[in-house]
Amino acid sequence: DAGVTQSPTHLIKTRGQQVTLRCSPKSGHDTVSWYQQALGQGPQFIFQYYEEEERQRGNFPDRFSGHQFPNYSSELNVNALLLGDSALYLCASSLDHKTDTQYFGPGTRLTVL
Amino acid sequence: KQEVTQIPAALSVPEGENLVLNCSFTDSAIYNLQWFRQDPGKGLTSLLLIQSSQREQTSGRLNASLDKSSGRSTLYIAASQPGDSATYLCAECTTSGTYKYIFGTGTRLKVLA
């Protein structure tokens, strides 16, 4: 059984560009959460999706948006990239939005030059 | 404000020592608390999950405790080994809003051979 998978593994962009990160949840999971981890910091909650809708959002600007597909996979989009967006982006999935355990993927390392 | 604090920020110990990592949290609406390990440049590996109704969990040389009344958790590592060197993150799953994790900034552990 595959766990949470994310693509790409690494990504390099320049300021002002747009980026899309992808996440496939663990089999049977319908809820996906996204986190941003800056260097030397703990992950910070960006938003959570279930039933193809954004259910809650952390303190991130509207440049960060997402989508969940009918197969429960999810995308994170970041527009107008800033140097400060450089971070490890982690995706976590859970059985449903009321379930305790979130399983984390390996992350996508985004570097903005 | 929901906040998780980890002390110490960094720790260097000789091999074989028993050690304690500390985590404190402010949100009393705790659903569970999870300890993670993160190797440099990598994603998160879940070590132990403690439900709000539990006092502790054990896995091998690891033992985690939870004291909701004081807002504290500790991770005890017995007989430390160089392979334990990593960053250890504590995360509180809170029921304030949707279920999401609030992370600490981690303790960077180095076990010297």
Image: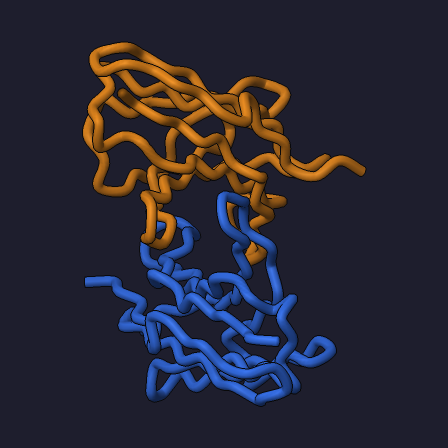
Chain colours: A orange, B blue
Res. A3 visible in picture: yes
Q: Residue at x 58, y 55 (%)?
A: A101
- Total marks shown come to 0
Residue B30 position within the rendered picture, expressed as x and y whole percent measured from the top left: 40, 69
Between residues A72 and B15, which one lies in front from this camera angle?
B15
Q: Residue at x 38, y 49 (%)?
A: A43
Where B14 sits versus A80, above or below? below
Res. A28 visible in picture: no
Residue at the extreme right of the image, as rendered: A1
Q: Residue at x 55, y 72 (%)?
A: B51
Residue B44 position within the rendered picture, expressed as x and y whole percent measured from the top left: 54, 51
Quarter of the figure with the N terminus of chain A: top right
Q: Residue at x 39, y 19 (%)?
A: A12
Horizontal relation, residue A103 to residue A17: left or right = right
Between residues B9 and B55, which one lies in front from this camera angle?
B9
Horizontal relation, residue B65 to residue B79: left or right = left
Residue at the extreme top of the image, as rendered: A17
Horizontal relation, residue A17 to residue A5: left or right = left
Between residues A77 and A83, which one lies in front from this camera angle?
A83
Where B26 sits versus B55, above or below? above
Residue B25 position within the rendered picture, expressed as x and y whole percent measured from the top left: 32, 73
Quarter of the figure with the C terminus of chain A: top left
On the image, which quarter does residue B68 sit in? Answer: bottom left
Residue B57 position within the rendered picture, expressed as x and y whole percent measured from the top left: 63, 79
